[in-house]
Amino acid sequence: DAGVTQSPTHLIKTRGQQVTLRCSPKSGHDTVSWYQQALGQGPQFIFQYYEEEERQRGNFPDRFSGHQFPNYSSELNVNALLLGDSALYLCASSLSGEWRDTQYFGPGTRLTVL
Amino acid sequence: AQRVTQPEKLLSVFKGAPVELKCNYSYSGSPELFWYVQYSRQRLQLLLRHISRESIKGFTADLNKGETSFHLKKPFAQEEDSAMYYCALIGYGGSQGNLIFGKGTKLSVKP
């Protein structure tokens, strides 16, 4: 099991563009959470998907949206990119709908907005 | 407000010295607390969680509700412990399911 995988590894976009990041959860996991990690900061929660629905959302604008597919993989979409969206985007998966369950992280996607 | 504070950005110790990485939290209720570690060029991974009460790689952490702290300790640091350490909590209520992280402490263990 490769664990949580994310693609692409790196991405460079310009302001105003749109981006889609992808995540495949650890085998057997059905819950996916997305985090944004700015330089020098801890990860900050964006939202969580379970059973193909957004179950919880952090303090991020509507420009950030997501989706979960029947195979539990997930996408994070960011519209109208701003310079401040430059960060490492982390995906984490967990085993069940139990919110206390341990979250396993992917390697992240480094997004640079110019 | 739910918050995790790690007061030290950088902690530098010599090999064999004791290590204590500080973590304080602000949360009304009984949060569940974690320590995550990120070694160079590796992904963020769980080191330990307080509910397990286990010791991983010689590290332990005790939840002190009176002081709202969850400090990470190791009696004898090793060079391979050099990494970025993040304290995090999962809360009840509106924060169900999401980890709230501190800003992290970089531990450097010198030979």
Image (cartoon, rainbow, N blue to C red):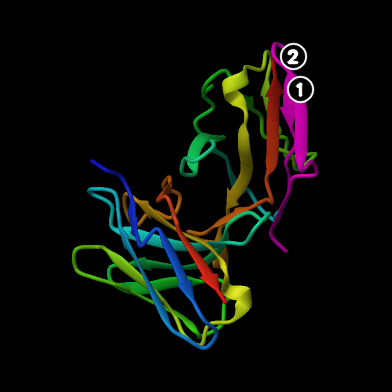
Q: Residues within 10 Å of mark 2 (few under 14, many from 20)?
A: few
Pointer 2 chain: B
Residues marked 2 and 1 touching at CB (< 8 Å): yes
- Residue B82, quarter of the rendered image: top right
Place of residue B57 in the rendered image (x, y in percent of width and height, measured from the top left): 53, 20
Mark 2–mark 1 distance (CA, rounded to whole Å): 6 Å
- Considering only vertical position in the picture, is A108 above or below A82? above
Question: Tag 2's secondary structure?
Answer: loop
Please report the residue visible at 23 percent of the width from the left and 70 percent of the height from the top.
A69
Disc ID at residue A70: none
> Residue A21 versus residue B29: which sits nearer the camera?
A21
Pointer 1 chain: B
Identify the image quadrant of the N terminus of chain A.
top left
Q: Is residue B6 magenta?
A: yes
- For this orientation, the residue located farthest to the left is A71
- Considering only vertical position in the picture, is A12 above or below B72? below
Place of residue B39 in the rendered image (x, y in percent of width and height, measured from the top left): 53, 35
- Considering only vertical position in the picture, is B69 above or below A94? above
Question: Tag 1's secondary structure?
Answer: strand
Left or right? Give the position of A51 relative to B40.
Answer: left
At label 2, the amino acid type is: Ala
Please report the residue visible at 54 percent of the width from the left and 21 percent of the height from the top.
B55
Residue position marked by numbered label 1 in the rendering: B13
Place of residue A74 in the rendered image (x, y in percent of width and height, measured from the top left): 31, 67
Left or right? Give the position of B65 relative to A88.
Answer: right
Identify the image quadrant of the C terminus of chain A.
bottom right
> Residue B68 versus residue A3: which sits nearer the camera?
A3
Residue stretch in magenta: B1-25
Please report the residue visible at 55 percent of the width from the left and 71 percent of the height from the top.
A58
- Considering only vertical position in the picture, is A101 above or below A80? above
Residue position marked by numbered label 2 in the rendering: B17
